Amino acid sequence: MKKTLLALSIVSLSTVAMAEDNVANGDVNYGDPTATFSSVGVSRSSDRTQLNSTFGWGAGNMIFADLGAGDKKDAEGKIDYDYRLRYFKVNDGLGYSVDVMGDRNTTTAMAGGMYKFDVTNNISLFPMLYGGYMSSKVEMQTDDGKEKFKDSTLVQAGLYAMYAFDDGHWLYANPKATYITRAKDYVPQIEVGGGYMVLDNVSVGFKVEHTADSKVSKKDTVTWLQASMYF
């Protein structure tokens, strides 16, 4: 399998589509990944469109559902789709999640969590650690040709750093590295982005995802534009 396919699978492990914080006094900041919220939205890159939805209820329960498709069909003439379904539980700044994500050829399941540290009233840090398993219908191969595999366990560690503006806007950076045990190599990545509140319940935003070159990934940068409505 080409390195590109594996990189697409790994980039989905990011904590993108970060959560929004609907606090008791009605103030909203849409950058906190340990908050409870409900929303619908759409994301667009140069060649893909993704529909995003989130439902939050009770004491910190969250469900994220994303479905995307490429503008062009794949090599077999089929729709080039991707998906992600995640359950997220938040408790006093500590978040746990279980993810299932993939596309036509790969399926990945991950579990782990993150914790919120407030550096100032506007700056927060979220260290995170996840582990899981990836399976593919197509054989994957390292760049040096020494390893070939269709499945592997994964470990991902990262840090989500957020600056929350007083008016509800936000900026974030999310560096992370995923270790693929079968490949015996890391895939370094970083995501930066932000959101701007155009209405009390509507935001527009952006994110830039960069994947570094490794034995199992090609150097790649993807830019997304996003719009969301909260309720």
Image: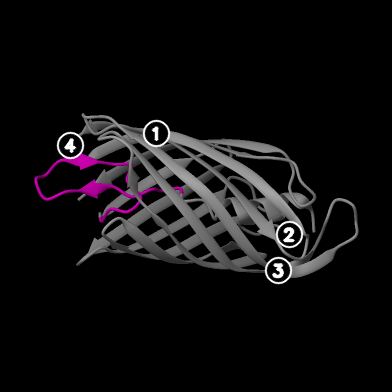
Amino acid carrying mark 2 in the image: Glu
Quadrant of residue 26 within the rendered picture:
top left
Q: Which residue is mark 3?
A: 152
N-term-proximal mark, 3 vs 2: 2
3 vs 4, front mark? 3
Amino acid carrying mark 1 in the image: Gly
Q: Residue at x 45, y 44 (%)?
A: 160
N-term-proximal mark, 1 vs 3: 3
4 vs 2, front mark? 4
For residue 220, which numbered disc appears in the image? none
**Separation (CA) of disc 4 from disc 1:** 16 Å
For residue 194, which numbered disc appears in the image? 1
Amino acid carrying mark 3 in the image: Ser
Q: Residue at x 70, y 68 (%)?
A: 152
Coloration mode: one colour
Q: Residue at x 28, y 61 (%)?
A: 55
Q: Residue at x 29, y 32 (%)?
A: 169
**Separation (CA) of disc 1 from disc 3:** 32 Å
SS at circle 4? loop
User: Is residue 123 shown above or below 184?
Assistant: above
Q: Which residue is mark 2?
A: 76
- Closest to the observer: 39 or 89? 89
